[in-house]
Image (spheres, coloured by chain):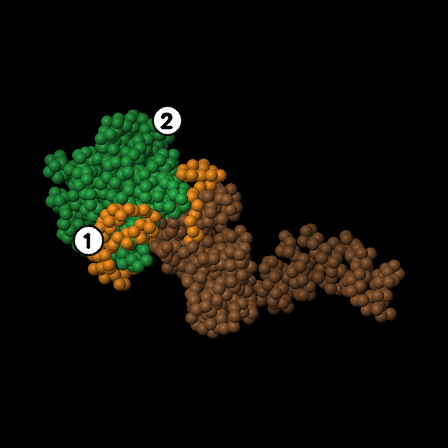
Amino acid sequence: MAPLNRDDVAKVAQLALLNLDDDEIDRFTGQLAAVLDRAAELEAFDIADVPRTAHPYPLVNVFRADVAEESDDVRAEALAAAPEAEDGQYRVPPALGEEP
Amino acid sequence: MSTTDAPVTTTEPSVLPDGWELVVGLEVHAELATETKMFSPARNTFGGEPNTNVHPVCLGLPGTLPVVNAKAVELSIRIGLALNCTVQRCVWARKNYFYPDMPKDYQISQYEEALNVDGWLALASGSTIRIERAHMEEDTGKSTHMGASGRIHDAGYSLVDYNRAGVPLIEIVSKPDLRGPEQAKEYVEELRAILVAIGASDGKMEEGSLRVDANVSVRPTGADELRTRCEIKNVNSLRSLGRAITYEARRHVELYGAGERPIQETRHWDEEGGRTRSGRSKEEAEDYRYFPDPDLVDIDPSPGWIEEIRASLPALPQARRAALIEVGAGAEAAAIAVERQLDGLAVAAIEAGADAERVLTHVANNLAVDGAESLDAGQFADLVRMEMSGALTATQAKQVLADMVESGRDPATIAADRGFEAMDSSELETMLDEIIAANADEWSRFCEGENKLQGFFTGQIMKATKGQADGKVIAQLLAAKKNA
Amino acid sequence: MSQTEGLGPVHDIAAAVRAGERSAVEVLDEHLARIDARESELHTFNHVMADEARAAASALDEAVAAGADVGPLAGVPVALKDNMCTRGTATTCSSKILDGWVPPYNATVVERLAAAGAVIVGKTNLDEFAMGSSTENSAFGPTRNPHDPSRVPGGSSGGSAAAVAAEFAPLSFGSDTGGSIRQPAALCGVVGVKPTYGAVSRYGLIAFASSLDQIGPFSHSVADAALALSVVGGPDPRDSTSIPEPLPDLIGSLGEGVEGLRIGLIDELSGGALDGFEPAVLDRTTAAADALTAAGAKVDTVSIPSTVAGLSAYYMIAPAEASSNLARYDGVRYGLRHDGPNTASMMAASRTAGFGDEVKRRIMLGTYALSAGYWDAFYGRAQRVRTVMIREFDAAYADFDALISPTSPCVAFPLGAKADPMTMYLNDVCTIPSNLTGQPAISVPYGADDAGLPIGVQVLAPLRGEATMFRVAQALENARRSEEEA
C-alpha cells in the first residue's frame, strides 16, 4: 500500500466536504499517515476465510408495525431549528450541477 | 424456465439503421403502498403541505435511528416472488453522498446482498426479460428551485420539502435484455400491472410513484458484446421513455459512425427539446463508500414466511390474460380487461354463456367507470344475451349497462322501466316511408349509388325513434327499400 | 436506610426520598450548591438545568406526598453527557456545529430516567462528538479532573465522570465507543460501565460510531451502577440493535461473591505485549488479581493476541462509521450554517467552520478507509480482524467466567500533555476490545498511584454477562474498602 500523500488527503477532504488550507493538509497528512502506518499490523492476520463483523450482537428481522405516529409540535420544533426556512420549507442556496 | 439464457426477441420495427441493435436495461423505482415510511413512523402519502409528513427519524435528526417497516418488507417479498426472484437474506447498506434532499446525507439501500435476485418477467408479446435484482431503499425529499426562470441553473435558491424523504422504494433492475423502445414500454407496463395487481404500489408515473431510468447502448446486430451505456434519467412517462431510448440509441450510432464513442455517463431527458443532455460531469467519479448500515440488522426471511406470502399472491396479469384468451378473448382485449381489473367479471360472464366478443367490447368501451368491478357477472351476461337476441339495441344496451353499474338492478327491470322494447320492423318501415317522402331528392341520389347518404337516412330514423332503433335493422330496411 | 446502607449514594437518596425522609428539592439544592462552589474551576457541564431540575424535584415531592410510587431513582440528581437528546434543552455534543440546537424529542434513556423519578441536573461536557480521551477536544473548553485540576478527567465522557467524582451528582451517564466511559471513570476514581452492545437503547444518543456506541452509568459504587443500568436498560422498539430480551437481574447476585469463579488476567493488556503502561497501574492490576484469588476465585493469565491490534481495527471502523454519521451536519436542517454561493459550498463552509480538528481527522480517516480502492485493505480488513477478536474472546470465555485488565495504561495526565493524536489514541488500548466485540466491561476504582491519582481495574464478561461482571466488580470494591480501612 502506497503511503498516504497530500493529494490523497485533499481528495478525501473534498469527498467529506471539508475545506483545508495547505498547512492543514500537511498536518493532517502526517497525522493520518501515522494511523495508517500502524494499521499495517492488521495485515499480519490470516483472514482469508474470516467473515466481516458489522454488528457485535447477532440479531436479524427487527421490524416495526406499519402504524403512523405524528406530532405537529415535533414538526414545528424541527423546522424552528432550521438555519433558514421559508413557507414551511428548508431554504438553501441554489444547487450547482445536476442531481447525483 | 432458465433464468440465465432467456431468449430475447422483439418483432417491433427497428428504430436504428440496418446493422445496429439496441440494448436496454431498465431500473424501475416504485414507491411501496404502505401507511408509513420505510424507517420512520411518518405517513407515506402523496402531496400534502410541505414538511407535514415528517418525524425526527425521517428528518435525520441527530440521535434518531431507523427501524424497518414490516409491511414494506412484506410488499417487497411479494414483488420478488411475482417477478420469480430468489428471496434471500439481505444487508442494509449506506450509500454516502451529500445532497440537501437527503436528510442524513446518505441513502439507506441494499448493495452487495439484495432481498430479491435472479428473477424474470414474461411479456405478453412473448419475450422474457431477466430481472437482476429488486432491492429496498428509501426515497429522497424534493427541492423546489426558486428563481427567475425556475430552472435549476439560474435558480436564486431552493426550498426543500422532506415529505417524500424516507418513503419506501423498491428498485427493480432488469438485465440488458430489452431490444426496442416499444418493448421497453411494454416491460414497464407489465411491471406496473404486476405491482398494482399484488397491491405493492399504486404505480402512478404521473405522481412519481413509478420512475424509470434507462441504461441504453447499441451494438452491431447479433453481437454478444455490451458497449458503453448511458443512464437516462428524468423520464416521466412511457411516451418519454420510448422517445428517450430512441434518441439516445441513435446518438450512439451516430457517434460510432463518426469514429467516436459515447462515454459512460448519466444523461437527462429533455422532454421539450426531445433530446438527452449530459449531466454535468463531476470533477471526479462518484465514490459512494457503501458499507453495512450499523443501525440496522439483516433481513433473513424464513422459508415459512416466504411461502405464506407466496400463497397469498393473487393471479398475476400474465395468468389472467391467459385465462381470458382461453375463453375466447383476443390478446389486446384480454390485456385491456386485465388492466381495468375487469378480467374476472369478463371471464365469469363469458362462462355464464355471454358472447365473448360482446363482453369484451363492453369492457373496453363502456365500463371504464368506477363501480364497474362490482357488477354482477350473471346480470352482465343477461344483458349481453338480451342484446344479442335483438331485445335491446346496442345503444339501449349501453344505457342499461350504465344503469346497472349505478343501481345494481337487473337488466330486464331497467329495460322495462325505460320502455326499451325492440321496435318491430313494420313500425320502422312506416317511419322510413315518411322520411323518404320528405327527402325525395336525397333518396333518389342514394338509390343512384351515393352511398354516404346511408348515414343521413340512418340518422333521420334514429332521430325519429330517439335512438331506440337497432342500427342493423335500419341497414337491412334501407337495403330492401333501395333494391325494391 | 438500613436496607441500603453501604450500597451507595444513589440507593441512599432514592430510599430516603421514597420514604419521605428527605425531599427531592433538598437533595437537589445540596448538589446545586456544590456545583456553584466548584463548577467554574472544573467545567463539567455545558449546561446546568437548575430551573428544570427544581421543577422536576418539586413535582416529585408532591407525588411522594400524594402517596405515589415515584420510582427506583426517586429524587436522584443525574448528569447526562451532552450527546443525549433532551427535548427543549440544548444538546450540543460540545461542537460548534450543534451549538444551541434544541432537540424536539427525548432520548429513550432520558424518558426512562424521568419515569424512574431521577432529576436531570444538566448536560455534561465531552470531547466533541465523543471523539477523544481527555475532554480537551470540546469546543467549549476542557473539563478538569476533580482530583487534580491541572490534569484531564479522561474522555470522552470526562464531564460526566468528573461530575460524579466532584459529587455534583451521585449518578451520571456517558457513552462509550472505545472506552469513553471506563477510561474517565478510572482517571476520576469512580465506577463506569460499558454494557453489552444493545443492552441500553441508543435512540437519542447522537451517534459517533453506531456499531460501537453504548450508553452506561458513572457512580460511586458498583451497586449504584447496577441499579442505574437496570433502570435505563432493556429492549427499545426504537432501536433496531436493542437486545429484545430483558436485562438479567443485576442486583440480586451482587453479594454472591467470586468463590469458584474462573477469572483471566489478559496478558497482552497487562504489560505483556504493549509498552506505555505505568508501573503503578500494573501493580494495582496485580493487586486486584490477588484480591480476587483471596476472595476465592481461580485467577490465571490468559492470552488474547488480537487485542494488540484492536487499536488499529478500531481506528478504521469507528472513523468509517463516523464519517457517515456526521455527514448530516451540512447546514441545511439544523445547527451552524456558513453561507456559500451554492449548496455544496454552503455545506462545506458550514462543516469546515463547525467541526474541530479531531472530528475532521476522523471524518477524513473514515472517508479514506471506505473509499474505492482502499475499502478491502482498511475497513474490510478491520471488520475481519474484529471477527478474529470475537473468536479469541469466545475461546477465552470457554475457560473463564470473566476477565480483568487495567482500564487505562496511565493515570490522569496534565492538560496538553498528549497533543499528538496517536499518543492520545493509545490511552484506549485496554478498553477498545470490548467495543469491538460488543461485550460488557466495567471500570472499578482500585487505589491510586503515589501522587494519589486514581487507578481503575477493568472487568470484562461475555455478551449479556453483566451479572457476573458486577459480581466480580463488587468483590473488587469490597477488597478496596477493606484495604482502605486497614
Q: Is residue A54 above or below residue B259?
A: above
Nearest the camera: B319 or B270? B270
Sort mark 2 into few (<14), some (14-19) or many (20+) by Cα contacts within 10 Å: some
* C213 left or right of B252 in image: left
Between tags 1 and 2, which lies in front? 1
Give the colour chain C carries in the figure: green
Residue A30 location, x and y as percent?
22, 50
* C112 left or right of A24 in image: right
Letter of the chain that mark 2 sits on in the rendering: C
Q: Which residue is mark 2?
A: C62
Residue B315 location, x and y as percent?
54, 62
Give the colour chain A carries in the figure: orange
Letter of the chain that mark 1 sits on in the rendering: C
Q: Amino acid at mark 2?
A: Glu
Sort mark 1 into few (<14), some (14-19) or many (20+) by Cα contacts within 10 Å: some
Dot 2 falls on a residue whose secondary structure is: helix
Q: Earlier in the sequence, mark 1 or mark 2?
A: 2
Residue C342 location, x and y as percent?
41, 45
Residue ID at (28%, 36%): C140
* Label at residue B142: none
Q: Amino acid at mark 1?
A: Val
Q: Which residue is mark 1?
A: C308
Q: Is residue B119 above or below residue B53?
A: below
